[in-house]
Amino acid sequence: MSSVQVLIVEDDERVADIQRLFTEKVTGFSVVGIAHSIGEAEEMLQILKPGLVLLDIYFPKSSGIDLLWKIRSEYRETDVILITAAKEVGILQEAIRGGVFDYIIKPIVFNRFQNTLQKYLEYRQKIAQIKTIDQRDVDVLLRPAKPGIADEEEMPKGIDAITLDKVIEVMNDLKGGGISAERLGELIGVSRTTARRYLEYLVSGGEVAADLSYGSVGRPERIYLKAE
């Protein structure tokens, strides 16, 4: 099977580039275009006819949901994965009704992203081999496509989804500046070592940046802040 051609639709150039880098790390996928507006996306869809669109929701003059329904209407062989900061239940419901394969909430964690793409590739490979289906086939095909489902198997050793969500929430709430592993541990109720492990995990995915703070006494302290 040839690689899945991917169109990234994201107005933030830095985030789009992260998605491109992440996608290119996963075997079986190739990025054929990056659109920074809904208008650009519509033009690229018509020309490129990608197999998969990685779609944001929020754009300055339009909504990714509108593009989702256009894809469903005019490009029925194109699948969609939403990657967005939108946390409204109504948007998730609309995404499910629009048939998205998955719904990933920013900031993007590479392991979660990779897991989704791998499940999507497995889905395409399985459905290409089936001529008629029974209930078991339906259950196997639909189970990985349920949006927002992440299990412990997706996480590397030493990282659990609940604690990671707490860390991401704190990082998202930072009002400028950064935070130390010790302070983060105090906020979420874990040790400094544990907090640092989660922060370094996010650094490895490009969602958090690290810097050194040179105090007046002692060694410099590692400070973490949201990546720009």
Image (cartoon, rainbow, N blue to C red):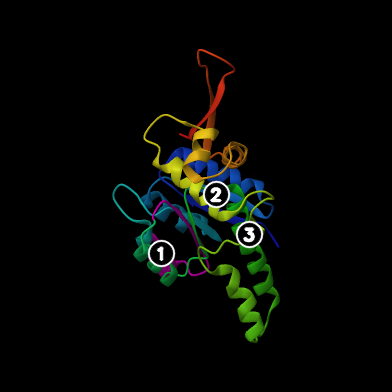
Q: Is residue 107 visible?
A: no
Residue 92 bears which disc, if any?
Answer: 1
Q: Nearer the viewer, residue 43 or 152?
A: 152
- In space, the residues marked 3 and 1 are separated at their CA atoms by 22 Å
Q: Are marks 3 and 1 in contact (CB under 8 Å)?
A: no
Q: Position of residue 226 (x, y in %)?
A: 47, 36
Q: Position of residue 215 (x, y in %)?
A: 50, 16
Magenta segment range?
67-86
Q: Secondary structure at mark 3?
A: helix
Residue 178 included in the magenta stretch of the image: no
Q: Counting residues from the N terminus, which is met first, the one under dot 2 or under dot 3?
A: 3
Residue to which mark 2 is pinned = 164
Q: Residue at x 68, y 72 (%)?
A: 126
Q: Counting residues from the N terminus, which is met first, the one under dot 3 or under dot 1?
A: 1
- In space, the residues marked 2 and 1 are separated at their CA atoms by 21 Å
The kind of residue tagged 3 is: Glu
The kind of residue tagged 1 is: Leu
Q: Secondary structure at mark 1?
A: helix
Note whether 127 is above or below 185 in the view shown.
below
Residue 61 as seen in the image, left or right of residue 95: left
Q: Nearer the viewer, mark 2 or mark 1?
A: 2
Q: Residues within 10 Å of mark 2 (few under 14, many from 20)?
A: some
Quarter assignment of residue 131: bottom right
Q: Residue at x 33, y 56 (%)?
A: 63
Q: Secondary structure at mark 2?
A: helix
Q: Nearer the viewer, residue 162 or 101?
A: 162
Q: Are marks 2 and 3 in contact (CB under 8 Å)?
A: no
Q: Is residue 214 visible?
A: yes
Q: Nearer the viewer, residue 119 or 77?
A: 119
Residue 168 bears which disc, if any?
Answer: none
Q: Are marks 2 and 1 in contact (CB under 8 Å)?
A: no
Q: Residues within 10 Å of mark 3 (few under 14, many from 20)?
A: few
